[in-house]
Amino acid sequence: MATEVTMDKIVSLCRRRGFVFPSSEIYGGLGSSYDYGHYGVLLKDNVKARWLEAMVRERDDILALDSSIILHPRVWEASGHVGGFTDPLVDCRTCKQRFRADHLADPEHTELHCGKRPSKRPGETPDCDLTEPRHFNLMFRTRVGAVEETGVDVYLRPETAQGIFINFKNVAQLARRKPPFGIAQVGKAFRNEITPGNFIFRTLEFEMMELEYFVPPSDAQQWYEYWVAERLAWHLRYGVREANLRVRPHEADELSHYSSGTSDIEYLYPIGWSELEGIANRGDFDLTQHTNESGTKLEWVDAGTGERFTPHVIEPSLGVNRSMLTFLIDAYDEEVVAERERTVLRLHPRLAPVTVAVLPLITKDAGMVAKAQALRDELRQHLSVEYDESGQIGRRYRRQDEIGTPWALTVDEQSLTDDTITVRDRDSLAQERISIARAREYLLERLGEPWAPPPRTT
Ligand code: ATP
């Protein structure tokens, strides 16, 4: 029987091992807000690093950008977010819960439950008293300026994309190439989400990894298909199981008015199939809007031939935190080994918060401790290493399994005489002996190998 992965198990592991804590807990917590502890920070950083690698480092056609969180308020008028960026919501006057109208209308959203009778969907019991769908603005508003009366209303950005569009001219000059080329950005975004969050799936603040890929208008469809395939391949490359992923093209009535195609990469979360990443063919809507609103022409001009056009934009947009949650869920496994249960995160080695644990077998043995610490100091220059000398070796292995450390190096008695160590593999539990001198090379080699998740077990 395969391990059943529930959101409760993930929440409990995250809390127990310090990946994610409820925010402001000593004040009673704040809904849909979370703080990230040590392993959460390391895992989240690795998710961002793998994305930037795939988007920027491994390519010649994409440049990086880091724009401000607070932009000129007219940016949001041009983009249509002021006034337009709302999800119609439905309130239940009886149980006081709030639901997204589009989710309520969609039977695939099986996570919606009546607040009084959770076995029923909202609206299914005679006591349910639902309002008509109403609009709420999802942008957080604040003020710039020392004096409240004379300040200017500004917004915390609900996406990073607009910061990219308004920098199109700056970056296009730097890129010195004709479209296709892209601009990639990772950064915080804020949305006044009103519906319940499902842990870090939907939060008030989160990080986004967004690419705006500018293409000649006639090539837009082809590049849209390319990016859907490319982004799906990224999730698979870092170990998400193929059976748990699907691409769902939006129906015509779901599309934004400017989009000629949008696909969601969906994942089978414990709450059901839901959006992991969105890829949209946005046409020339954004550049045209900002050109009209700002008076600055955002277009491609060939200095030599004078050829000019407004590029179309393909946008893959992924939440860092939602991606991290997906990797955690997909990696979670429980199994019984030698009559003892273990919880293991079978994370891709290049995502795991700690790449290698270094453990002296007998912690009272000064020789083993010294050798293990010297190995730790050497490996630490290249990899994320954790040294652990507290408790029995079996316990220490299990602690590493739970945070997804792919390899553990153990210094034992034999190490003192022949300078070898054992390498324990998190997934197969196989142990092999290698020389200490080769440890670094061995790990770097293993890290470079393609990796696929082993099947879930019990
Ligand atoms: P949803 O339908 O889930 O609200 P959306 O269609 O509004 O998402 P987009 O605007 O396409 O989302 O955002 C792009 C990506 O950003 C999403 O695929 C998701 O990974 C992430 N994301 C969006 N909103 C949130 C949130 N409140 N918390 C965490 N991640 C989010």
Image: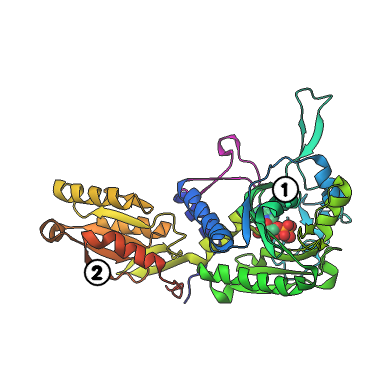
Q: In whole angstroms, how far apart are the C-alphas of marks 2 and 1?
A: 49 Å
Q: Which mark is residue 69?
A: none
Is 211 on the left-hand or right-hand side of 242? Answer: right
Answer yes or no: disc 1 within 8 Å of ligand 1: yes
Q: Which mark is residue 432?
A: 2
Indicate the quadrant containing the C terminus: top left, top right, bottom left or bottom right. Answer: bottom left
Give above or below for 152 relative to 443. Answer: above
Residue 26 counted in the magenta span:
yes
In the rendered view, how is the structure colored? rainbow
Q: Of the residues under marks 2 and 1, which one precedes in the sequence?
A: 1
Query: The disc labelled 2 sits on which kind of residue?
Result: Glu
Residue 87 counted in the magenta span:
no
Question: Is residue 135 visible to us here?
Answer: no
Mark 1 lies on a secondary structure that is loop
For the residue pair 432 and 20, the one nearer the viewer reads as 432
Q: Which residue is mark 1?
A: 191
Query: The disc labelled 1 sits on which kind of residue?
Result: Arg
Is 453 on the left-hand or right-hand side of 305? Answer: left
Q: Which residues are magenta?
A: 18-37
For the residue pair 255 and 326, the one nearer the viewer reads as 255
Give above or below for 70 relative to 299. Answer: above
For the residue pair 17 and 94, the one nearer the viewer reads as 17
Q: What residue is shown at x 13% (from left), y 58% (from top)?
A: 413
